[in-house]
Structure formats: C-alpha cells, structure tokens
Amino acid sequence: MSASLMSGAPGGGRFAGVRKIAVFRPNAVGDFVFALPALHALKRAYPDAELVLLGLPWHAAFLEGRPGPVDRVIAVPPMAGVGLPPDVPDGGAAQRFVRAMRGEGFDIACQMYGGGRYSNPLVASFGARLTIGFRADGAPPLDRCVRHAEPNNRRLALLEVAALAGACEVTLGQELAVTPADRDEAARVLSESGAGPVLPPLVLLQPGSTDPRRCWPAASFAAVGDALARMGAQVAVNGTAAEAPLVGRVTDAMEARAIDLSGKLGLGGLCALIEGAACVVSNDTGPLHLALAIGTPAVGMFWLTNLIDGTPLRQGLLRAALSLRQECPECGAPNLSSRCAHDASFVADVPVGQVVAMAAEILHARRGGVA
C-alpha cells in the first residue's frame, strides 16, 4: 500500500491522492442495484476521483450518459473463474485484460464479485495502490478484506467493502436516475402497444426470473392483476422476449385487459415505466430491485434467505410476501445450504390474497400521497 494512501485513517477516514477507483462487479441487473449504495458512498467519499465500473457490455450501454456515481464502464471479458468455468482456457483474455488494467493506474481497486477465490488474485494484479474486497475462507487476501458470508444483506455487505476505503456515508434516497431518453422509450412502447391512453394508477407485473425456483405461478399473477384492475388499476405485464410465453399465460388468464410488454422494452425504458407506475408486483428478480432503487413501492415474492440477501436500505418501499419452504417440492431435499437438481418453485405457496392486500395498501397510500 502506498504511503500517500496511508494518510487516510483506516477506521473510516478518507485516503489521500485518490484519482481513480476501480470496482470489479461484472454481473446481472439485480447485482448492480445491490451495489448502488456502495457506489454512491465511494463517489461521495472521493467526488473528484474517476469511478470506473469493471462490468459487462450491458453496464456500458445502460450507464452511458446516465447521471450517477459511475463515470466510466470497462467491459470484463470472460475469463477462467470469472464468466467461464475455472478449467476453460480464455485464449489469453485474462493477460490482455490485466495489462490494460495496470495501464489505468488505479489508486483503489474494489473486489465486489463473490468470495475472491478467482477474483482476488485478478484484482490484486491490477497494481492498484490499495486493494479491498470480499474474502471467503481459503481465498487469497487483498490489502483489506471483509469476510464473505451467505446469506447476508448484499447492500450492507457491499457498503462494508466501501467502508474499507473510508467511504462510510450512506444517504437514503433515489439510487438510480431515469433519463429523458428512458421516458421517451417507455412512452413510445406504450403508444405502439395499442393500449390507448394509459391512465393511472399503473401496476406492473413481473412474472419471470432467471431462476425458476423464484417464480410465482402465472395463474397467481393473473389473479392479482384482475383484483387490482377491479380497484381501478391499469395492469401491464413485463418480461423479456424469451419470457413472452409466460407473459402470455398471465394475460390470457386475466379477465381484465392487460398490456403485454414482453420483449418490447429496453432496460432504460423499463426504468421509466417503473418510475411512472404506482406499484410493481414481482418475483425476486432485476426489475423488482430496479423499482426499489428508483423509489417505486413494490410487492416482492421471496423465498426465505433471498429476502435476507435482497432487502433494500429503504425498507418502507418493499412489501415482502415470504415463503418459508425449506424442502424441494419435488424431492423433499432441504435447500438451505445446498441446491438439489430440481427447478420447482419455492414460492408457489405465497397466498394470492396476501399479495393483493399488500398491493392494495400501496395503491391506497399512493392515492393519499403517502407512499
């Protein structure tokens, strides 16, 4: 560690001479949202430093021109142990990437990507004057580490990493900015949907997830959509293009008319739609966490430990409908500390009535200007 950096107090003081910070976190939408409080804390601690997110191509596209703590994105190529299985050759991608990162001249490099078995040696090789991050048992050390543990509140854990660099200030407020381009995209997609004028309150249903174990049944989403439509809400159902059949099962099962948005919105347009919604009803997946970062109240279906991982700092925004199931519905194997081979839903037993009541509470509060 550089002597100039040592002028900062390790117990929470800021370090001197910091001009460029790297944050290594090349993963998915929800994982990016979990990191936002830590990214904001780093930017507040070092407002004059360039904050560079070492992420994925989607980060670069999404964050281009978007106000926020990230100044620049560098896409991380697939490498052994990071994006590729540990025993798969990467064709020299790791060596080329390390050379480029050493050329950046980072003052602080933050490892916010797992327990560090593969990512800690990679981040240490960047040549930063200070390296910080997670460390699981048996993983190589960095200059300063936080123990990697699961389950935990990921936002708080990432804030612990940021605190190792003296970034301790946390502000509770909107974490993700929505841009005029986002709003233009959402307005265009709604206009092209043929739904006619979309009158508030708008409720967005998100029935998909990359993990099928987190998926609440389509019939349950349809029942919630109909109940909220009877309360005067306009219902839209979102999903990726690959999730179009699932979205179709929800809209086909509804008696009320719903807007099918599957495959129609980019990530920015989705943010704008969420911003304009009165409520989001979602599985534990990226759009739910986008809503919480933007400041839109949401009902989320969670399985047990996932709620510990995903609880937002602004807890008043989230109504969590929780399943306490521990055993796989197919084979009966416990899944708390290990995962069986089945993909059956672990949240199917969340009652429809509970979700309707939570969403209705949000709609009532929004009409009264409370939530």
Image (cartoon, grey):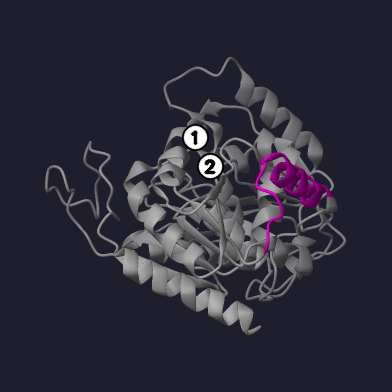
Amino acid at circle 2: Gly
- Pointer 2 with pointer 1, Cβ within 8 A: yes
Magenta residue span: 181-199
Q: Quadrant of residue 227?
A: bottom left
Which x, y percent locates residue 338?
24, 47
Pick the quarter of the image with the N terminus: bottom right
Q: Is residue 339 left or right of residue 100?
A: left
State the residue position of label 1.
Answer: 244
Q: Residue at x 84, y 55 (%)?
A: 19
Question: Do we see residue 144 in this rendering?
Answer: no
Q: Secondary structure at mark 1?
A: helix
Of 269 and 311, the residue lying toward us:
269
Which x, y percent locates residue 90?
55, 19
Q: Is residue 285 left or right of residue 56?
A: left
In the rendered image, the vertical position of residue 134 relative to residue 75, given as above or below: below
Question: Do we see residue 68 in this rendering?
Answer: yes
Disc marking residue 116 = none
Question: For residue 215: magenta?
Answer: no
